[in-house]
Each structure stands twice: as C-alpha cells, then as structure tokens.
Amino acid sequence: MFLVDDLLLSPVRGLLFVLKELHQRAREELLDDDAVRQELRESYMLLETGRITEREFERRELRLVGRLEAIERMREEMR
C-alpha cells in the first residue's frame, strides 16, 4: 500500500520541491540590494560624466532609494 502511495505522490512531491526552490530564489533576488546599489553607483557616474541630467539623476536616485528602503522593510518584517 505504501509503495502505491509513494508512486502516486512522487510527481506531487517533485513539483512541490521545484516550487519551493523557485520561491526561495525569487525571495533571495527580491531582497538582494547589491544590484540596486550598483545601479545607484552607475547613476552617480553617469551624472558626474554628464551623460544624464541632474533631473534624470534625481528621478533615478528617488526610485532606487525607494527600492532600498522597501528591501530593508521586507527584511525587518521577516525577522
């Protein structure tokens, strides 16, 4: 009886494992602030080299700082 149950539930368990892995990786990517910080550094560089305007920089900075704050709030909520 247990062998039949194992055979029938095997695909479900495999799918559940894959879904858990996808969830974990999505969560890690969502909480990864390194990419956001890198984009902020690049924005500073673009401003300093004159490739973007002060106004464009301010829009980018506001958006990126907002993302960093959201990441920090999510991390706090998870603790």
Image: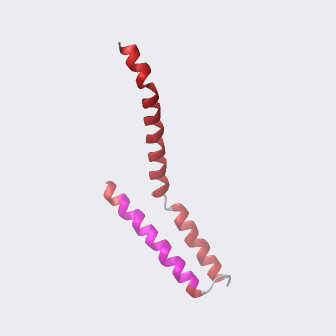
Judge by depth and name the residue closer to the eye, 17 or 57.
17
Judge by depth and name the residue closer to the eye, 18 or 54.
18
Q: Tell me if 70 is positioned left or right of 47 in this view.
A: left
At x 57%, y 69%, the residue is: 39
User: x, y (%) of residue 4?
Assistant: 40, 16
Look at the magenta stretch and give its main secondary structure.
helix
Corner quadrant of residue 47 = bottom right
At x 49%, y 58%, the residue is: 32
Q: Which residues are magenta?
A: 56-75
Tell me, yes or no, whether the highlighted magenta stretch contains residue 13.
Answer: no
Q: Is residue 7 above or below residue 26?
A: above
Q: How is the image coloured?
A: secondary structure
Which image quarter holds the N terminus?
top left
Q: Is residue 76 above or below residue 4?
A: below
Q: Is residue 69 above or below residue 52?
A: above
At x 39%, y 64%, the residue is: 72
How many numbered marks have been drawn onto this rendered protein structure? 0
User: x, y (%) of residue 71?
Assistant: 42, 63
Which residue of the protein is positioned furthest toward the bottom in this rendering?
54
User: x, y (%) of residue 16?
Assistant: 43, 36
Q: Is residue 33 above or below residue 61?
A: above
Tell me, yes or no, whether the highlighted magenta stretch contains residue 74.
Answer: yes
Which residue of the protein is positioned furthest toward the top in this rendering?
1
User: x, y (%) of residue 59?
Assistant: 52, 81
Corner quadrant of residue 13 = top left
Q: Tell me if 36 is positioned left or right of 51 in this view.
A: left
Q: Tell me if 55 is positioned left or right of 67 in this view.
A: right
Which image quarter holds the C terminus?
bottom left
At x 44%, y 52%, the residue is: 27
